[in-house]
Image (cartoon, rainbow, N blue to C red):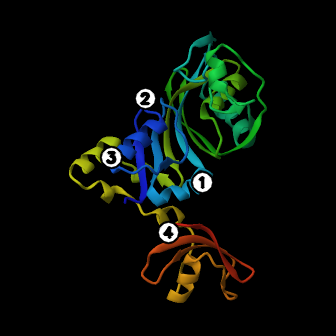
Amino acid sequence: MPNGILVIDKSADWTSMDVCAKVRGIFHEKRVGHAGTLDPMATGVLPVFIGRATRAVEFASESEKEYIAELKLGVITNTQDTTGEVVEERPVTVGRDQVLAVLDRFRGDILQIPPMYSAIKIDGKKLYELARKGKEVERKARPVCIHELELLESTGPADYRLRVRCSKGTYVRTLCHDIGEALGCGGCMGALRRTMAAGFTLDDAVTLEAVQAAADRGEAESLLLPVDAYFAGRPDLILKPEAEKKLRNGMTLVMPALPEGEYRVYGSDQTFLALCRAERGKLITVKSFFPV
């Protein structure tokens, strides 16, 4: 059965679940999940985990992400992007220098009020379901972190291209909306392309069309990255057969000389077994990836 990570360069108008459904059909594997939802209008990096690799999704979804976003000033919409209804238009009297100056307010730890058109649940109801009925409810501001925020270029009299590196849970369209509000002219997001997620970049990504073409040639599995690729930043640890047997049986290994930290753990035949954590002289399994 196929196991691995497929980094998709998602096209516009596809939902993240559409992509998973397509991959499920191509690989004939029910266990498919993705790290980090992309709205239909957004394009770019969508890591898809297949087979046993789905066990790594929980780690991938916590990671930083990077985007290229189009900021459109002077236009306010109900979705905070150009797919929504325009609720107000304002004259734009600010230029590049004012935009550059206001970005400082949005770097580092900030608070965001989630948009009504989002999948966040309040009292068991998804916000976008309420928004489609014309309802608006109070939302609590949530802490997020904007690690990097760069003005790349001006693409029009009231249009700017931004590079955003941010924490999990950040709404880039809300960031565009809030920047517009801070400038006094309002704003929304005109386009969004994710360039990095879960440590993978566009250089790692392939289109769904390329995956389908490879499948037609019987070569789709050649596009899969091994699941341990996601944990490449951690040191590796190769176990001897006796220790490997204990780990496979769910036992904690006593390894007093092993420095504390997380490890990619392999069997003597280089099979990736688990992500483990060494602490107080013991090696504890965080998540196993071997077949059972």
Residue 13: assigned label: 2
Q: Regarding mark 4 in the picture, which secondary structure is present there?
A: loop
Q: Regarding mark 1 in the picture, which secondary structure is present there?
A: helix
Q: Quadrant of the N terminus?
A: bottom left
Can residue 94 be seen here? The reply is: no
Q: Is residue 263 left or right of residue 5?
A: right
Residues packed near mark 4 inside 10 Å, few (<14), some (14 to 19) or many (20 plus): few
Residue 126's spot in the image, x, y percent?
66, 28
103 shown above or below 223: above
Q: Residue at x 56, y 85 (%)?
A: 243
Foreground disc of the pair 4, 1: 4
Q: Earlier in the sequence, mark 4 or mark 1?
A: 1
Residue 26: assigned label: 3
Residue 33's spot in the image, x, y percent?
50, 48
Q: Earlier in the sequence, mark 2 or mark 4?
A: 2
Residue 292: assigned label: 4
